[in-house]
Structures are given as C-alpha cells and as structure tokens.
Amino acid sequence: MTLHLAQFASHHFRNLAHEPVTLHPRFNFFCGENGQGKTNLLEAIYYLFTLRPLRSVRPIDLLAWGESQASLSGDICGRIERTLSVQFGRQKRDIFLNGGPPLSLDDYFSELQIVAFTPEEIQLVRGSPTLRRRFLDRAVFNTDIRYLREVRQYLKLLDHRNALLKSSSPDRALLDVLAEQFAQAGARLIRRRVGLLESLRPHLRDAYYRIFPDLLIEIDVRYQSTLGSLPTLGEHPSTEVVVAYEQDIFARFLAQIQKIQSRELDRRMALIGPHLDDLEFSFAGRPFKQVASQGQTRALVLALKIAEISEIKARTGEHPLLLLDDVAGELDPRHSGMFFGFLEETHGQVLLSTTSLAYIQLPDIERYPCFTLVQGKIAPSPLGAEHSAQHQERE
C-alpha cells in the first residue's frame, strides 16, 4: 500500500487548533473562506514531511502569535508504519522518529515523497529563477534523499568562498583549493538537475498534449547554466556516462572559475554556479513566456506538476502525497477536469483545500471526508448535499 498520512496534529502552528485530524488514504477536502487556516494546515503537513516551509518565510513566522515554540506530529501508514514529529522555535529544531531522535536525516526522510501545488506556483514559468530552481531541487530530492546533503555541502562551500572573496586580502592558495571543491560540488548538483530534467521531459510533453490533444507544436525545457551550453545526458544513461558527464562539467566549471576569478574578486562574490542557474521553457522553439498565452502557461505549470508526480512513481514505485492549495479555483473548467482525471488515475493520498466544493470535479466525492476550517478549527463536514448544491450553482 502507498504510504499515507493517517493522522496529523499541530500545536501552536500559526492559527491552527490543537485537535488531531484523521485522514483518508485517498482524497481529503478542506473547505473554508480565505484566511481561515487552509493554507496553514497544508504548510504544517509540508513542514512535517520536508522540514522546510511551503513558502519562503522564517521559522518565527510559522509560530502562533505570542508563542516561542510549535510542534507537529503525524502517523505514517502503508508498507512502513512510523510516527514523525518535529518541535521548533526561533533558534532550535528537534526531530523525532517513532518517539526518539533519528540516527540521521536520511532515516527521517526515508521513502517520504510529497508534492505541493499552490497558486504561487502558477508563476513558475514567468516568475523569478528562484522558483524554478526550488522546483527542480525539490523534484530531485523527492527521488533521492542524498541530494539534500549534496545541496548543503555546495551551499557551505559557496558561503566559505564568498566570505574569502569579500576579505581584504584573500589567501590565493586557499582560493584555489576552494575553487576545486566548489566546482566539484557544483558539477554534482548540475549533473543531478540535468539528469532529472531529461527524465521529466517526456512526462511533461505527454501531460501537456493531454491538456491540448490537438496541439502540434512542440514544447521543451532546457537547463540554463552559468557555465554556458551543456551537453545532454539522455533519459537512461549508464553509470559510465554519468561519471564522464560530471567530470566534464567539473572541468568546465573549474576552467571558468580560473577565467573570471579577477572579476569575482572585484565583485566580492561567486559569479557562476548552480545557485544562479535557471530553466528555460520553449514553445515551437521560442521562449515560452514570450509567445504562450496565459492559459497555455497555466497548463504548462499543471503539466510540470503532473510530470513530477509521474517521475516519482517511475523512480520509486510510490505515489507521492499531494497537497493542493486552492489550485482548483485557479484553473478553468477544462484544465480542472483534466487535472482531476489525472488524480483519479493515481493511487496516492491527496489533501486539497478550496473555498468551494463546486470546483472539485471528482465522481463519488461523497465517499471521502470533508473538513471545514473556521479560524483555524478543523471540523468534519457533511459533503454530499453541499457539493451537489454548489456544483449546480457553478454550472
């Protein structure tokens, strides 16, 4: 059985009440007006699974007003049963697995896959590069938890190197040593990202053509590196090809650092690396955000999320937990119907927030639990009659 969150509880997390919530292994609906706590609930679950906020906020912003510490806990069921919990405050965070500290973060994260889809991610294509890097890094981590250590190692080297570049008289020998370590760690991240992107591409095209079955124009996504144009890696490269590819990226990276190091010393910061890279989506060979309509752009983001879910299933054999925050209301009826059709075909757990159940295009919706949120309090709600009335009103 696919892993799912069976029960969840929070304490002093934003405006959420303390009562535990029992969840269905498939669909769960959270209905309420804006500002009542729907997003807070999904963000709390996302934080429990990833130890990162759903949005770019500080840990202090996740605490209830006037509180110094919050806690989250959840029972995971399926092939493996475990209890996750985390306590955090302004400066400290403690995590627990089955009541005790895990031996490593890998043990805590093991076999946990979660995908979140929020209204903010509609800006994924047209927004800042940070959004696209965050999406790609999260997608890589969802298929291999070792990636978290690799990212942390790279960021640590980036901080160290930037500090040295900012110093009044940097040690040139130490700069050279750091340059090699930095290029090695960066090459590994680039290889990981490019590899994941190569695997995502066919899923992305399939999903997009499902939304627009008559579309004969090709869409594509490419990795934009500060190192310049990179070779492709292929969908299923051998170990030898992967090793050679990473070595090639490392050599390019190191050569580029040596070429621009005087400029980096003048600017007092690293000017190349995966922390500055981006993704470029194309539509008939032209930049997507320049030629595609708003509807086509929304469909691309939707297809990208479907591609991520499909790739997680292909790599791990598991369907991820899916968090949908008011997304149904952001899609037109055609795209919404297509998306819910895809959700029916998956077998993972779905937690969906909405301001109106009329947006939910699922048959037999009455089989699944619905919860109403009012000022952070979560209460079971009768669903059938309410959904039928709202659906008729929308039509």
Image: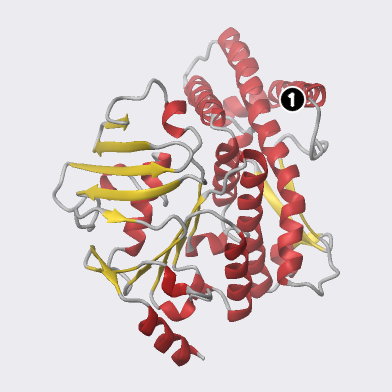
Q: Quadrant of residue 295?
A: bottom right
Image position of 180 (left or right of 73): right
Looking at the image, which residue is at 64% across and 41% down?
277
Residue type for callout 1:
Glu
Image position of 168 (left or right of 288): left
Between residue 46 and residue 314, name the one nearer to us: 314
| Residue at the extreme right of the image, as rendered | 216
Image position of 381 (left or right of 237): left
Which percent across, then down, holds residue 380?
28, 68
Q: Quadrant of residue 174?
A: top right
Between residue 162 and residue 392, name the one nearer to us: 392
Asked if 195 appears above or below 369 in the picture, the reply is above
Asked if 9 appears above or below 351 in the picture, the reply is above
Between residue 250 and residue 167, name the one nearer to us: 250
Looking at the image, which residue is at 67% across and 63% down?
300
Looking at the image, which residue is at 62% across and 64% down?
342
Q: Secondary structure at mark 1?
A: helix
Chosen colour scheme? secondary structure
Which percent across, then down, holds residue 317?
62, 42
| Residue, disc 1 | 246
| Residue at the extreme left of the image, as rendered | 66
Residue 198 in sight here = yes
Which percent across, then down, holds residue 65?
17, 53
